[in-house]
Amino acid sequence: MVLQLVLWAVYGSGNIKASGKIFIGTNSTQEAAASAYELIVDGEGILEEVWVKNSTNWPDYVFKDEYNLMPLEDVAEEIESLGHLPGILSEKQVKDGYAIGEMQKALLEKIEELTLYAIEANKRNKQMQSEINALKSEMSKMKRQF
């Protein structure tokens, strides 16, 4: 049996302060498994906002010249072999949970990479449209000659 002392203070403002760990809707097995955490909740929560402090290497590096954007063909091969996006945790890896801050960072990296792919595709589309227009003009000139 684990005895845990949790000290509570309720202030006139309605604020609650706890010194120790807070377990909500948990059982002793869950509490023992999550002993490294300060707040353990078994169930859903409704929050207006969650603030995640994550100051490590934010994915703006994707937009730097030295970033090596993986060719789409290689991305397709990796998806085929891995069964998920490269750089994103697999279903098996997230089975027991994942860090929201790290996942947000990984997802933003993929969004930024997608933006770069879209910009490149747009450039190619404009170039091809320009070439199509030039070919149409040439064909029109050739038709008038005959």
Image: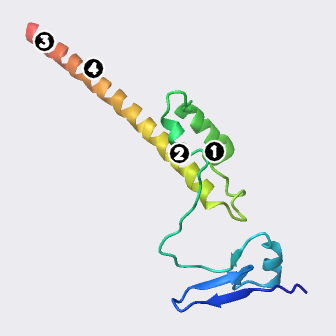
Which mark lies nearer to you, 2 or 4?
Answer: 2
Determine whether the residue tagged by mark 2 lies in a helix, strand or loop. Answer: helix
Task: Give how far across and how far down residue 1 sits, in percent.
Answer: 91, 87
Query: How busy is the neighbourhood of tag 3: few (under 14 within 10 Å), some, or many (20 plus)?
Result: few
Image quarter of residue 57 = top right
Is mark 2 in CB contact (under 8 Å) with mark 1? yes
Q: Which mark is residue 131?
A: 4
Query: Which of disc 3 and disc 1 is earlier in sequence?
Result: 1
**Residue 95 rendering spot, x and y as whole percentages:** 71, 63
The kind of residue tagged 2 is Lys
Q: Earlier in the sequence, mark 4 or mark 1?
A: 1
Of 10 and 32, the residue lying toward us: 10
From the viewer's perspective, is 84 left or right of 31? Answer: left
> Quick one: 119 or 10, which is closer to the camera?
10
- Residue 146 appears in the picture as rendered: no
Which numbered disc, 4 or 3, marks the residue that appears first in the sequence?
Answer: 4
> Farthest residue toward the front?
12
- Residue that mark 1 sits on: 87
Q: Which label belongs to residue 110?
A: 2
Mark 1 crowd level (few <14, some 14–19, many ≥20, 10 Å Cα)? few
Residue kind at label 1, given as amino acid type: Gly
Disc with the residue nearer the chain's start (3 vs 2): 2
Report the amino acid beneath label 4. Answer: Glu
- At a point 63% along the width and 42% down the height, the residue shown is 80
